[in-house]
Image (tube, rainbow, N blue to C red):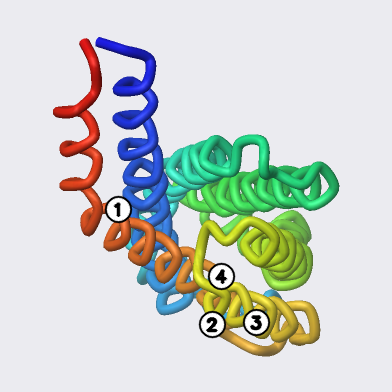
């Protein structure tokens, strides 16, 4: 098999891998975030009644977070592979750095909530009456509703800039990314569900990549048939 055929097959598989990883990330994160939002009150100073009524739902949501993070990391990797030599170093650095920071904050917040659930199962009364519970809830709220949201906006801006420069996604998706990123950067901590804008945008990109990839398998096959062996 020639190097040309190997290159053709790789170019077909890489976008499809990016699409599948992006769709998986978006679905898992939206599911986890929705379960958490419906189970845990947005007020970080609430009394912790959700631990009595929704601890199992919260645990389920937390179990989805690691898989979502792995899928997102894979999504970043295969997108950078698709960009290849067209990748702008400045925007690529911001793209990769903001993506890793999003993952770090997502994992840290999930870990803190998981610790709260475990501690409640061991000493429920002592936990709810302690300053530690209030501190943990406030830290999680701040990380996700301030820092993670802003970093998601930075990720979307850098990805949209790369898209416009390289054309790896349509320009309308890039401009939509700019608009949603501006919304995230200017939003306040009191706006619930705003974080869903990020995985929804990733989902749109992934669906487009997958559809675009599925429309072109015949071209790759035809080139392979006519390639010299």
**Within-10-Å neighbours for mark 4: few <14, some 14–19, many 20+:** many
The residue furthest right is 90
Q: Name the residue located 41 percent from the left edge and 66 percent from the top edge.
A: 203
Q: Which mark is residue 193?
A: 2
Q: Name the residue located 43 percent from the left edge and 48 percent from the top edge.
A: 68
Q: Kindly report which numbered mark, 3 or 2, lies closer to the viewer in this rendering.
A: 2
Report the residue marked by disc 4: 198
- Whichever of callouts 1 and 4 sits on the residue coming sooner in the sequence is 4
- Whichever of callouts 4 and 3 sits on the residue coming sooner in the sequence is 3
Q: Secondary structure at mark 1?
A: helix
Task: State how far apart marks 1 and 4 are (Cα).
Answer: 23 Å
Evaluate whether residue 137 shows in this view: no
Evaluate whether residue 19 shows in this view: yes
Residue 43 x, y percent position in the rendering: 65, 82
Residue 130 x, y percent position in the rendering: 72, 59
- Whichever of callouts 3 and 2 sits on the residue coming sooner in the sequence is 3
Residue 26 x, y percent position in the rendering: 41, 61
Verify CB contact (< 8 Å) between mark 2 and mark 4.
no
């Amino acid at each position: 098999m020639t190097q040309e055929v190997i290159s053709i097959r790789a170019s077909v598989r890489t976008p499809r891998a990016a699409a599948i990883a992006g769709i998986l990330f978006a679905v898992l994160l939206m599911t986890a975030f929705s379960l958490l939002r419906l189970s845990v009150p947005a007020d970080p100073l609430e009394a912790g009644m959700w631990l009595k009524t929704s601890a199992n739902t919260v645990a389920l949501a937390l179990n989805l977070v690691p898989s979502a993070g792995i899928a997102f990391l894979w999504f970043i990797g295969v997108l950078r592979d698709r960009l290849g030599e067209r990748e702008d170093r400045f925007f690529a650095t911001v793209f990769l750095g903001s993506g890793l920071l999003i993952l770090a904050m997502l994992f840290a917040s999930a870990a803190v909530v998981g610790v709260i659930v475990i501690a409640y199962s061991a000493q429920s009364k002592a936990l709810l009456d302690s300053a530690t519970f209030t501190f943990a809830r406030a830290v999680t709220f701040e990380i996700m509703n301030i820092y993670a949201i802003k970093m998601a906006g930075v990720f979307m801006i850098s990805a949209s800039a790369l898209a416009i420069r390289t054309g790896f996604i349509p320009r309308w998706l890039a401009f939509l990314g700019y608009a949603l990123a501006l919304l995230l950067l200017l939003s306040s901590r009191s706006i619930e569900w705003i974080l869903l804008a990020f995985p929804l945008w990733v989902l749109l990109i992934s669906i487009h990549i997958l559809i675009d990839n599925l429309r072109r398998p015949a071209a790759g096959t035809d080139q392979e048939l006519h390639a010299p062996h």
